[in-house]
Image (cartoon, grey):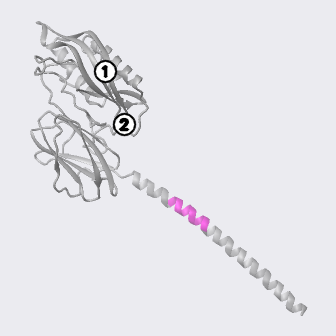
Amino acid sequence: MKYKSALKILFSLSLIAGLSSCESNSQSTEHSGTESSGIESSTEISVEDSLQCPDSPSGTLENPEVIDISDQRLQKNGVVTPGNDIGFTFVGQEGQRINYSYNDQLCVWIYTPDNTLLEGVELPRNGTYTIQVASLRGTTTFDIEMSLSNPVVSTPSPANQPETSSTATASRPRRTPQPTPTPTQTPSQPSTSSNRATPRPTSSSDLTQSQAVSLVDGWLDSKSNIFAHPFDQSLARRYTYTDGPLYYDITKPGGSIDWLRSNNSYYNYGNTSITEIISFSVSGSRPELIVTIYEETTLNTPTGVDRSSSASGSRRYSYSFFKENGSWKIFDYRRL
């Protein structure tokens, strides 16, 4: 009996040791599986982050929507699925600039009237253009804003010059401003793919109304040194976003500064001030400040004052803003 009892005790101890060993192996396997899962997750994120828009779309585009963006900022949103792209067509003129911005996880291409991809943002000819929107990965929502700025014309005018009936049809060096999204729509340079506008919309804003008003005040004060000797482009860089349409129109070859220098002309500014703050909003793709500005502007030429490009009065303007290197700047403006 004692011998049998001893065998039972030894068998029980062996069974307990075996169960402990299995449990230990199970925990080890689970721990190893966790580590393996972590590595797979990290690899998957790396692959997703490496996704980029191709140079040309691979999806199909059927029945693109006809839109008009010649005198307005148009916003479109919806859902796009892989292989079934969303499209829009619009009529553009040579010299106009397409301004557009959109959310992440999208690819955007623009086709010219001769069915070639648009490089940059300036339209090369008159005709119907096509915007094709695709998903970068999987089914996703899209939100895109689009507008057109008018072609460059032959004579100058700095931003915010009030227009009378006599000056409304006069030539101006800066295209009549239109609202633009990042990004960019506007983007004077593409991003990611060759036709991707910069900048992209910001998801949140820390710009306050007082900061926005201060930026516009500084911009108005600086114009007498930007559009007259010494034609200080550093002041333009201080107050305007350097990849935005306002800075581009001022500093490009044939732009406002270049025209004034070439024609030995300059602007004088009299009383200029913000007389009313209409609204301030941070709910859109870019913060927007709407104000009334009174401005007295005189264009001086070698033959005297150009009355057709000189005026005084109050007009209402909308300013949009974008952050550059941690500092808020004016992205563009439009006359209301």
Q: How many marks?
A: 2
Q: Is residue 142 above or below residue 43?
A: above
Badges 1 and 2: C-beta atoms under 8 Å apart?
A: no
Which part of the image, by quadrant, shows the C terminus? top left
Q: Which of these two is toward me, 209 or 140?
A: 209
Image position of 306 (left or right of 248): left
Q: Is residue 26 above or below residue 319?
A: below
User: Residue, x 21% and y 14% (percent of image)?
Assistant: 313
Question: What SS does tag 1 mark?
Answer: helix
Q: Which mark is residue 12?
A: none
Query: In the current view of this chain or complex, which residue is farthest to the bottom?
Result: 1
On the image, the x and y values in percent for residue 200 come to 33, 40
Which part of the image, by quadrant, shows the N terminus? bottom right
Q: Is residue 117 magenta?
A: no
Q: Is residue 14 above or below residue 114?
A: below
User: Residue, x 29% and y 58% (percent of image)?
Assistant: 81
- Which numbered disc, 1 or 2, marks the residue that appears first in the sequence? 1
In this figure, which residue is indicated by the disc labeled 2? 283
User: Residue, x 18% and y 13% (percent of image)?
Assistant: 311
Q: Amino acid at mark 1?
A: Ala
Image position of 174 (left or right of 15): left
Region rendered in magenta: 30-39
On the image, the x and y values in percent for residue 109 come to 23, 47
Image position of 252 (left or right of 274): left
Question: What SS does tag 2 mark?
Answer: loop
| Label 1, label 2: how far apart the Cα atoms are | 26 Å
In this figure, which residue is indicated by the disc labeled 1? 236
Dominant secondary structure of the residues highlighted in magenta in the image = helix
Q: Residues within 10 Å of mark 1 (few under 14, many from 20)?
A: many
On the image, the x and y values in percent for residue 129 come to 14, 44
